[in-house]
Image: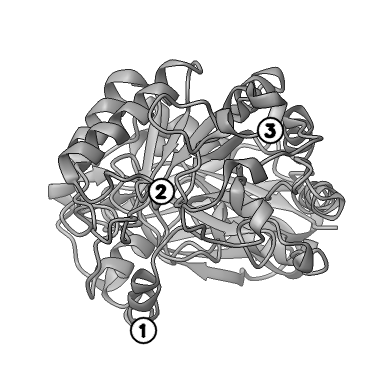
Amino acid sequence: MMRLLTRRTFLVAGTTALTGALTSRVLDVSAQARRPRPSRPQLAWQRDELALFLHFGVNTFTDREWGDGKESPSIFNPSRLNARAWARTARAAGFRAMILTAKHHDGFCLWPSRTTRHSVAESPFRAGQGDVVREFVDACRAERLQTGVYLSPWDRNSPVYGDSPRYNDLYAEQLTELLTQYGPMAEVWFDGANGEGPNGRRQQYDWPRVWALVRKLQPNAVMFSDAGPDVRWCGNENGSAGDPNWSTVDPTAVAYPGVSGPNVIRALQHGDPAGAVWRPAEADTSIRPGWFHHPAEDGRVKSVDRLVDIYGQSVGRNSKLLLNVPPTRDGLLHATDEARLIEFAAKRHALFGNDLASGKSVRWRRTSPTTGEAEVDLGRTARVAAVRLEEDIERGQTIARFRLEAMDTGDWRALARGTTIGYARIERFDPTPARRVRVVIEDTVAPPERIAIRAYSGE
């Protein structure tokens, strides 16, 4: 995708030091009286649950993942581009947001930027009058989807890349164009990609300036990067959040996008139960092996069952799923990808569309300052194959360990054990007859609050 090989290297090295002490550490509950809580934009962002990522640009036409900035704009001509069709598919599949690669590492801008000639303005697309960002934004608005853009900091075309003050000015100008000409943005997406420019030099990014500019121009947008400041990367490109996964972090653990170190992946994957900042994880992956469309991968689209597993490992682990579905050279989503998205929606509805606990009251009691129990009577014996648990994250996140049990007649039977809950925790298990479902909260980092329980029979 858009991260450097050095980052992948330390990702692999860090995966051996993941969970361990995060749930076993003893925390002073009195010190947690005021837990970090999400802002309104962060809360709205997480409640969307599913977003579509669209990798599109000159790489689509060169059949590459990373361009070198030497591509001629003349190759970019998606003759049948239909952003409204992208948005209709996203909406039909239950997605609530889309993010477009407005500029990737090759530096080609999908809008007519004043900062460069390496853009759609120099291409034959729409006879040189095209603006993919405009069509994308208009399509999102028409389909009532939240809108986001990715602007690569690495620019392999810009002659001033590596001349840090000059490129930082150029990057701020590009960002200003995107954030002032296209209406409200819900998410602005960054990574720490930092390779050599055409002059062989590397760039020193001014991240505080970038973040301040976004906050000024789009105060209701969340910013994503390794270091947030609003939403963090989950630490891999598999769409799999950590377990445990705290939405609170220590902001010094990942100080800027692209930083490496022995504890970086651990911090990204798991957050920090004692963290002072609310920065939930976004789990990204592609529906195909690559991030841009490659015809050779048309037969390698992820299966519905794999997508459902990813949903459970992202949304079901207190994260949000950002699923990449790249447009083709024609400017359309591939028919196989479209069909798979609709099948994915149908499968989720079959598994989670009928809440057996809907309308039933949850009996709650706190059994100690760090434990509690929540129980729901389904009103009848039913086949239960999945349970979704939810904390009220408007009040923060507290649960560190729980067990899930069911009863039909006789004794309580264990269904699952888990660590964090947060926005959502989804547990799937062999179908079990149950009249009552109980969650025993075994440990928290602050006095536990009432939780929601949803129970499903599966297909």
Looking at the rendering, in which quadrant would you find the C terminus? Answer: bottom right
**Picture residue at 60% right of the left edge, 24% below the top:** 137
**Picture residue at 28% right of the left edge, 41% below the top:** 229
Q: Secondary structure at mark 1?
A: loop
Q: Which mark is residue 258?
A: none
Picture coordinates of residue 180, whole percent (x, y):
41, 16
**Picture residue at 69% right of the left edge, 59% below the top:** 287
In the figure, 74 relative to 201: above or below?
above
Kind of residue sitting beneath label 1: Thr
Between the residue at mark 1 and the residue at mark 2, the CA separation in whole angstroms equals 37 Å
**Is the Cβ of the residue at disc 1 closer than 8 Å to that at disc 2?**
no
Q: Secondary structure at mark 2?
A: loop
Along the line of sight, which residue is nearer the eye, 87 or 33?
87
The residue carrying pointer 2 sits among few (fewer than 14), some (14 to 19) or many (20 or more) residues within 10 Å by Cα, namely many
**Quarter location, residue 419:** bottom left
**Is the Cβ of the residue at disc 3 closer than 8 Å to that at disc 2?**
no
Along the line of sight, which residue is nearer the eye, 387 or 52?
52
Q: Which callout, 1 or 3, points at the residue further toward the start of the chain?
A: 1
Q: Which callout, 1 or 2, points at the residue further toward the start of the chain?
A: 1
Q: Which callout, 3 or 2, points at the residue further toward the start of the chain?
A: 3
Along the line of sight, which residue is nearer the eye, 371 or 350?
350
Picture coordinates of residue 172, whole percent (x, y):
29, 30
**Is the Cβ of the residue at disc 1 closer than 8 Å to that at disc 3?**
no
The residue that disc 3 covers is 124
Is residue 251 shown left or right of residue 90? left
Q: Nearer the viewer, mark 1 or mark 3?
A: 3
Between the residue at mark 1 and the residue at mark 3, the CA separation in whole angstroms equals 49 Å
Q: Which mark is residue 157?
A: 2
The residue that disc 1 covers is 16
Is residue 235 shown left or right of residue 131? left
Kind of residue sitting beneath label 2: Asn
